[in-house]
Amino acid sequence: MRRRSWVAVVAGAVMAVLPAGCGSEAVPEPQGSWVAAGASAAPPSAAPSAAPSSPAPTAAVVVGNPKGRAAVPAEAKAVDTSRPTRVIGDGTPASCTSKAVVAAVAAGGVITFDCGPDPLTITMAATAKVKNANGPKIVLDGGGKITLSGGGKRRILYMNTCDKAQGWTTSHCQDQDHPQLTVQNLTFADGNSTGETTEGGGGGAIFVRGGRVKVVNSRFIRNRCDDTGPDLGGAAIRVLSQSKNLPVYIVNSTFGGGKGLGGRCSNGGALSSIGVSWVVLNSVLTHNSAIGSGANPARAGKPGGGSGGAIYTDGNLFTVRIAGSIVTDNHAEEGGGAVFFVSNDRTGTMTIEGSTLQRNPSDGFETRGFPGIFFLGAHNPTVKSSTLRK
């Protein structure tokens, strides 16, 4: 990775100028059928992770922030999947297998599930990988009933326009407008990319480089990536480069949502990126943790990491917008219990609108006046109609 520099600020005081390099506990699955926080897609339903065909749950569990009032642009809404290209399953739980998911994702197109009336968990025996020529649109819609589980052993979904094994479709893989990946009405549980080294690792549930990606009406629980290391991160999602620096949309989705359900990674307990813009709308990010130690680059005797309890972002020109969202009870061993934002050339900007950020402790450092946030950019974060508290 390329080398960078940033300044750590604690309570407004300059601490140091540093050059920066580019186990889960068993907890019960919350019971309940899901209610989507928004009208852009069919209401999703929760799925227990323990067995392929557990009984249908009874209590309601809300996905995303139903009180969020951020407007969702057309390009960020769920995709119409009423006429799918392919369907996983024949109406029975037994027909919905890891092998079927891997094959469908590789084939591309609009993908739905027909696995019977009850919620179902599909434990992946292999990572589903997007083939770059099979698009340009790839939509994976769980209909609110499907959980894709990494079983605590593997990453769940992978897309990389610069991975020759998945095929090159242009001469400039780092900036192309396809494939365009949408995941919606799905649960991603117990993904784990620990030990993955391609593109620096990270992305316990989903890893993306290039093209476009958006997430709608979905939930991410108990995902993991490497415990230590500078820059790597994203227990749930890791993104490197998007076409024309267009943003990754996260809409009406939940990352964590309860004690013991959050993601854990060296950096970015939920989301992580380098040089990528994000728009997080009407979503919930809670109980996620950045568990590395030593920051970036690693202090002497430390392995590095520990920043961005919920969100870790780095790069030059990029933006982060959080609107209509709840970001609480996240934790960073180093900087930014909620959000770590470093724009190396100081061109990046961050906006928080109609959101609540509180109880996001940073054990090492954060920016004065912005509890839970470490920020270096064009100017201080813009905060509108929001609550920021310790």
Image (cartoon, rainbow, N blue to C red):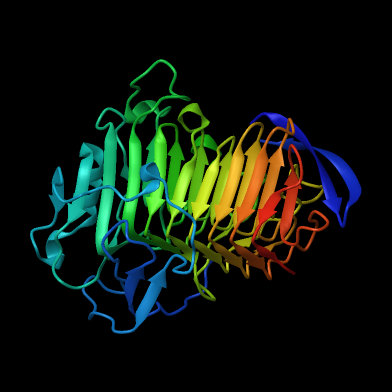
Q: Horizontal and vertical percent for residue 278?
A: 53, 44
Q: Is residue 117 visible?
A: yes
Q: 29 left or right of 122?
A: right
As drawn, the residue found furthest toward the left would be 90
Picture quarter with the C terminus:
bottom right
As drawn, the residue found furthest toward the top would be 171
Q: Identify the residue at horizontal 67%, vertical 68% (top origin).
A: 358
Q: Is residue 195 visible?
A: no
Q: Horizontal and vertical percent for residue 62?
A: 40, 72
Instruction: State how many labels appear.
Output: 0
Q: Quadrant of residue 160?
A: top left
Q: 351 left or right of 98?
A: right
Picture quarter with the N terminus:
top right
Q: Horizontal and vertical percent for residue 90?
A: 8, 59
The residue closer to the viewer here, 43 or 69, is 69
Q: Horizontal and vertical percent for residue 179?
A: 33, 33
Considering only vertical position in the picture, is 311 above or below 210? below
Q: Identify the residue at horizontal 31%, vertical 30% (top origin).
A: 132
Q: Quadrant of residue 285?
A: bottom right
The residue closer to the viewer here, 228 or 275, is 275
Q: Identify the residue at horizontal 42%, vertical 51% (top origin).
A: 72
The residue closer to the viewer here, 221 or 381, is 381
Q: 16 left or right of 354?
A: right
Q: 112 left or right of 149?
A: left
